[in-house]
């Protein structure tokens, strides 16, 4: 299926979600809530938005260092460019785009750098271990929606970790196992697929270097998670509501799971529905407050990702059209 078709279908899906969202909320009450916006909070939100990406970019730079040492500014622009691409394209190609940009600027093979991006994202799972620790303190009336989502992601994470550890000791066995799963791939492409898998697993070897930077990576992960939670709390505060910290922390720890599947372009409707399901259905927040907060967060993210995404691509020296053609 062509990307244009996927974009069109994703847009239709997003429009359906936004229409459902409009049916679920009181538009007048939401607008009244937004009219209470504390504008002085907005610059702080922008700063936190940048810090979120800076911390994760710095962590990627550490993971990537055994393969290629790059400047933190390069890591930041490539990282935010990948989020920018994923934000507008309803298929997960931003990570490949990040590897392409690295190849374009530093000549690193895509198959060699992809594992570093994957491992960098795996550090986000630290939030789930924190959540397990917090479980005894979570209100008993929380929706099962949150629990089921957490259990699902933890199972997926466990399977991925088993595969990663296995690949460190039995590379050939993992390659053969994955090739068996690729039985549907046409014969003329199998050698290329096998070569890509072999290079990818070789790249996973960077995980052996993690102990050298483990403390720094962990501290950056914790810093990013704290920034995420403060950002969400301040979004609520900006629209006139001092949200309880526990629901905010839980949402900041688990919201990554909602973006595993392809999403509509620009997260149209999807972002609002996620906030609604977690905060309204899960924690019983007033719908107009959640609607106002999600609208502010979505509009702000849309503007900032567009600005920083385009600036980052310009800094790297490529256009969005060129990146999409190559990946």
Image (cartoon, rainbow, N blue to C red):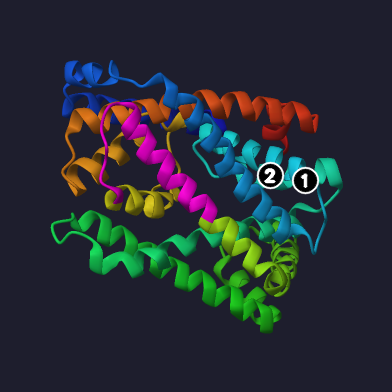
Question: In which quadrant is the C terminus drawn?
Answer: top right
Callout 1 secondary element: helix
| Residue extending farthest bottom | 169
**Magenta span covers which residues?**
223-245
Given contact means CB atoms under 8 Å apart, are the residues at marks 1 and 2 in contact? yes
Count how many numbered circles sit on residues in the image.
2
Residue 241 highlighted magenta (yes or no): yes
Evaluate whether residue 1 shows in this view: no
| Residue drawn at x 39%, y 49% as measured from the top left | 252
On screen, residue 269 above or below 188: above
User: Can you identify the residue that label 1 sits on?
Assistant: 102
Residue 21 located left or right of residue 301: left
- Which quadrant of the view contains residue 134? bottom left
Residue 298 located left or right of residue 135: right
The span from disc 1 to disc 2 (Cα, nearest Å) is 6 Å
| Residue drawn at x 44%, y 60% as measured from the top left | 127
Task: Find residue 215 and report its horizontal and vertical position in percent.
Answer: 63, 68
User: Can you identify the residue that label 2 sits on?
Assistant: 98
Task: Find residue 275 and report its horizontal and vertical position in percent.
Answer: 30, 39
């Amino acid at each position: 299926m062509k990307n244009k078709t996927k974009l069109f279908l994703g847009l239709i899906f997003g429009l359906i979600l936004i229409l459902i969202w409009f049916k679920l909320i009181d538009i007048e009450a939401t607008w009244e809530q937004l009219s209470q916006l504390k504008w002085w909070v907005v610059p702080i939100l922008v700063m936190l938005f940048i810090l979120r990406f800076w911390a994760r970019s710095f962590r990627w730079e550490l993971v990537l260092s055994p393969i290629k040492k790059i400047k933190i500014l390069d890591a930041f622009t490539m990282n935010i460019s990948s989020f920018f691409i994923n934000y507008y394209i309803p298929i997960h190609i931003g990570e490949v785009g990040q590897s392409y940009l690295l190849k374009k600027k530093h000549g690193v093979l895509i198959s060699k750098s992809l594992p570093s991006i994957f491992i960098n994202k795996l550090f986000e799972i630290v939030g789930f271990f924190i959540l397990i620790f917090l479980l005894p303190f979570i209100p008993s009336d929380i929706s099962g929606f949150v629990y089921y989502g957490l259990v699902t992601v933890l199972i997926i994470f466990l399977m991925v970790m088993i595969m990663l550890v296995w690949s460190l000791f039995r590379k050939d066995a993992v390659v053969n196992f994955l090739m068996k799963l690729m039985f549907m791939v046409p014969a003329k492409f199998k050698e290329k697929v096998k070569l890509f898998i072999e290079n990818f697993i070789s790249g996973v070897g960077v995980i052996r270097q993690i102990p050298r930077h483990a403390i720094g990576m962990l501290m950056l992960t914790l810093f990013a998670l704290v920034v995420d939670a403060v950002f969400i709390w301040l979004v609520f505060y900006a629209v006139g509501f001092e949200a309880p910290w526990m629901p905010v922390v839980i949402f900041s720890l688990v919201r990554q799971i909602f973006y595993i599947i392809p999403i509509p372009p620009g997260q149209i409707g999807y972002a609002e529905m996620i906030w609604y399901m977690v905060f309204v259905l899960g924690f019983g927040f007033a719908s107009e407050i959640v609607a106002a907060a999600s609208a502010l967060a979505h509009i702000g993210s849309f503007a900032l990702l567009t600005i920083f995404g385009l600036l980052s691509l310009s800094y790297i020296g490529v256009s969005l059209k060129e990146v999409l053609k190559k990946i």
